[in-house]
Amino acid sequence: MMWKFEIPATARTPAVTFDFAENHLKLTGESYPEDVTEFYKPVFEALDTYLAKLGKGSCRFDIELIYLNSSSAKAIMMLMDKLDAAAANGASVEVFWYYDREDDTMQELGEEFGEDLANAKFHLEKMAK
Amino acid sequence: MDGRDLFDLRATLQRQGIIFAFSGYMTETVLSGVGEAIKQKLTIDDADTKTLRSVFAVFVEQMQNIIRYSAELAAQSSAADSPLLEIRYGIVTIGQEGNEYVVQAGNLVAHKDVERLRGRLIKIRDMNKEELRALRKEQLRAAPEEGSKGAGLGIMEIARRASKPIEFDFTDVDDCYAFFTLKASV
């Protein structure tokens, strides 16, 4: 069992910090990769493997993005769907969406993603300054 | 040599309030580099965070539209085992009009694609923020349109970030192509 999955941030891709041992997963930074599919493929694979074994366990997913482009939004939606599906299967999943208080577009985007979560618990929070 | 031609080009751009202009074959590296310079310039201008992010967001979508969809391209047919090398041509400018930043992009589109694109642009332009939000959510769930390499969401993101309705134009170039311009103010 892999206990951690990490990808360091670049100017165009977020830091991925999946601490599976602590059931704490994070996506931090900016997301406008050259190739969205290529970047998120291994991230989804690691997440799928983890969620498949989560069962009735609990996990927390933090999304702390300053900016994401329109094609990344599709990837984030798929990620949310995976988390919601795990919650539907009995896991206790909490999603925290952090937004910059000076950019209400990111707040609205968080609200939109949150509306679609039927089973996972969603929290909308301001980023710490 | 005579530097006047280049100086005249620069003067024309400056008269229109343009602070950045790039015309040529676009790559993701150009996007990163020019994008970084835009962030720095707006930081120096003391633009607020929301304006800076919105100008940047519109710029990214405009650039990626050209990189993915411009009908003017240079391509190298390669061996079966190596990827096709392909770059597309367009023009992007960022300028100031009064208190607003304006991001304009232009590229060639095939005449056969003009009506479909125009229809989509009119629909998005005439929507209020609520309608745009609903359409975006719907499109995010939908499969990408045929001939689309992205989620088809770029124009909606531009409209959402813009402070007033997007503007666009199609100018006939020849029998095959029109020049498509998209303008967004932030």
Image: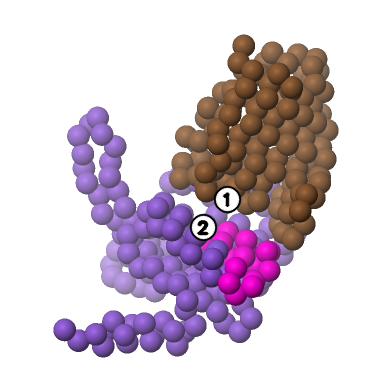
Chain colours: A brown, B purple
Q: CB atoms at circles 1 and 2 under 8 Å apart?
A: yes
Count of numbered badges drawn on the protein: 2
Q: Could you tell me which secondary element the residue under label 1 belongs to?
A: loop
Q: Which residues are magenta?
A: B43-60
Report helix, strand or loop for mark 2. Answer: helix
Picture quadrant of residue B74: bottom left
Q: Quadrant of residue B108?
A: bottom left
Residue behind mark 1: A69
Q: Is residue B110 left or right of residue B127?
A: left
Report the amino acid beneath label 1. Asn
Q: Which mark is residue B60?
A: 2
**Residue drawn 55% across the image and 64% down it:** B39
Q: Position of residue B145 (x, y in %)?
A: 51, 45
- The image shows residue A108, relative to residue B149, as above or below, that is below
- B58 in the magenta segment: yes
- Chain under label 1? A
Identify which residue is drawn at 66% across, 46% down. A65
- Residue A116 within the segment the image draws in magenta: no
Q: Are marks 1 and 2 on the same chain?
A: no
In this view, the residue in front, B98 or A74, is B98
Instruction: Please tell me whether the stretch drawn in magenta is mainly helix, strand or loop.
Output: helix
Q: Residue at x 68, y 34 (%)?
A: A26
| Amino acid at the residue labelled 2 | Val
- Residue B67: name its quadrant: bottom left
In this rendering, is residue A117 above or below B148? above
